Amino acid sequence: MKILVTGGAGFIGSKFIHYLLKEHRDWYIVNLDKLTYAGNLENLKDVEANPRYRFVRGDIADRGLVDHLFREEKFDLVANLAAESHVDRSILDPAPFIETNVKGTQVLLEAARQHGVRRFLQVSTDEVYGSLQPDDPPFTEESPLKPNSPYSASKAVADLMGRAYFVTYGLPVVITRCSNNYGPYQHPEKFIPTIILNALADKPIPVYGDGLNFRDRIHVEDHCRSLDLVLQKGQAGEVYNVGANNEHTNLDIVKAILRLMNKPESLITFVKDRPGHDRRYVIKPAKSERELGWCPLWDFTTGLPEMINWYINHNPLHPS
């Protein structure tokens, strides 16, 4: 079995490659990654000599490169994890998000169609659903798409393009929408690493607005298990939500990290809120549990200390 994993040098992508190499001894993996600021081959240093793994540096929006790679390798499966994913960056400049998340996804879909790929996994985000009010029920796969940032809008378009390729061409596309990931090796610009690294340096910890934005957070290893299950058991044309039923406010998470690190809450610094900041995301993973037999194994009470200890015991791969 040959699988193309795009964005495999990133946080989630590198963890997914490690997971696949461990769980599927007869799978051959090609990692296509542009190596932007968010990609780091150090994440895959321990597998670079593995005969079942190959790295290719390139852009998923490069039609010539992508088509050549598909003709050369004759992939059975594609898992598209390549994405521009930072909301603040998308607010400053949406253009790279359109180029990678929309155009890049369409280039991959077309190559998969032309070369008869057996399964195309489009890895998306719960942010495509928009924002919930405090008393609203969790998002389901039937929730309307109401993206509020250039990032989430670009991911919503990519999802709809995947659906169109399934309906129009019969390409066996499956889509996953996951809640916020956390875990070791996450890029320092993300929320939890920023808190940990600033606390380690006794620097102010910026918190948007009042800090009462709710998020459901899932350990990256649980996310990777769900992606593998969707590749193997998911029904073509379907969407699968992946969440951990682990809802906390941003402020609660900051305070929990400071307690675990024995740092004072006086480090908390409230800053001007992000434009269009979604108030609440929480996802209902009942369909994934029912149809795929998936459930999260990591608990936040153990996952968060594990992540803190990793940053304490390792120099960050990307300087903050």
Image (tube, grey):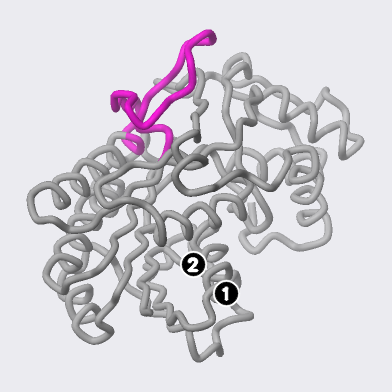
As drawn, the residue found furthest toward the left would be: 168
Residue placed at 36% from the left, 79% from the top?
Answer: 2
Of the pair 216 and 278, the residue shown nearer to us: 216
Q: Position of residue 85 (x, y in %)?
A: 42, 46
Looking at the rendered structure, which numbered label has been put on residue 94? none
Q: Is residue 148 magenta?
A: yes
As drawn, the residue found furthest toward the right would be: 262
* Amino acid type indicated by mark 2: Ala
Q: Give the main secondary structure of the magenta stretch.
A: loop
Q: Position of residue 78 (x, y in %)?
A: 32, 66
* Amino acid type indicated by mark 1: Leu
Compared with residue 106, is residue 257 higher up or lower down, i.e. above or below?
above
- Pointer 2: what residue? 9
Q: Quadrant of residue 61?
A: bottom left
Residue placed at 59% from the left, 69% from the top?
Answer: 43
Of the pair 146 and 291, the residue shown nearer to us: 291
Q: Quadrant of residue 4?
A: bottom left
The quadrant of the picture occupied by the N terminus is: bottom left
Report the side of 250 relative to 254 (left or right): left
Name the secondary structure under disc 2.
loop
Residue placed at 26% from the left, 54% from the top?
Answer: 173
Q: Residues within 10 Å of mark 2 (few under 14, many from 20)?
A: many
| CB under 8 Å between discs 2 and 1 | yes
- Pointer 1: what residue? 44
Name the secondary structure under disc 1.
helix
Residue placed at 23% from the left, 40% from the top?
Answer: 157
Q: Position of residue 28 (x, y in %)?
A: 43, 82
Q: Residues within 10 Å of mark 1 (few under 14, many from 20)?
A: some
Q: CA distance from mark 2 to mark 1?
A: 7 Å
- Please count the marks in the image: 2
Please state the extent of the stretch shown in magenta in the rendering: 125-152
Compared with residue 299, is residue 26 higher up or lower down, i.e. above or below?
below
